[in-house]
Amino acid sequence: MKIFLSYAPADRPWTNELASLLISAGLAVSSRETEIRLGEDWEDHFRRVFNASDLMVFIFTEHSAGNPNVLFELGVALGSKKPTRALWVASETSEVPAILKGRRLVRVQTPQEAAKQINAFISEQMAVA
């Protein structure tokens, strides 16, 4: 299974740790920053990795709530029929970003918790298929 991770640049260290855990579990991981070809247009790159992905995972933090790339990627994912999982990485007092209100949202604090939730979601999806 190939997972696309969407996140804000400020969340790169956290997301890189999550990606390492997912790769260790035997999953393929990509993002808008991976696998980009020299001179490739960003939108073309996103379309290519999006189309090759089986699952879209969005890392929402105070950094990504207003990030135009993350919001664009979320819009594309929600408009498609691809399985999508939104992870909210926030403190207990943080408010849920408006774009996530009314959607199934998984609150996590650590990359380890996120990896566990993603693996559970994949198992759930495979059981339904």
Image (cartoon, helix red, strand yellow):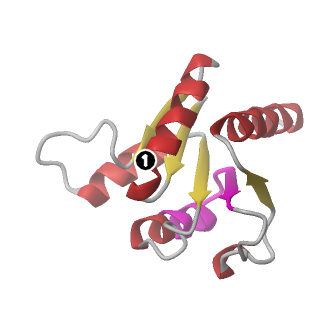
Residue 76 in magenta stretch: yes
Q: How many numbered discs sit on the rendered protein?
A: 1
Q: Which residues are magenta?
A: 73-90
Residue 74 % position (x, y):
55, 65
Residue 10, placed above or below residue 126: below
Residue 11, placed above or below residue 96: above
Residue 99 % position (x, y):
65, 78
- Judging from the image, what secondary structure is the residue with disc 1 in? helix
Identify residue type, mark 1.
Arg
Quadrant (top left/top right/bottom left/bottom right) for the N terminus: top right
Quadrant (top left/top right/bottom left/bottom right) for the C terminus: top right
Let me know if residue 127 appears in the view: yes
Whether residue 25 sits left or right of residue 104 in the image: it is left
The residue positioned farthest toward the bottom in the image shown: 98
* Residue depicted at 75% across the width and 32% down the height: 119
Whether residue 124 sits left or right of residue 66 in the image: it is right
Give the residue at mark 1. Answer: 12
The quadrant in which residue 21 appears is: top right
Judging depth in this view, the residue of 37 and 6 nearest the camera is 6
Residue 116, placed above or below residue 8: above
* Residue depicted at 20% across the width and 56% down the height: 41
Residue 7 % position (x, y):
49, 55
* Residue depicted at 49% across the width and 76% down the height: 66
Number of other residues with Cα within 10 Å of mark 1, as a class: few under 14, some 14 to 19, many 20 or more: some
Let me know if residue 52 appears in the view: no
Residue 80 % position (x, y):
60, 61
Judging depth in this view, the residue of 111 and 42 nearest the camera is 111
Judging depth in this view, the residue of 30 and 8 nearest the camera is 8
Judging depth in this view, the residue of 16 and 92 nearest the camera is 92
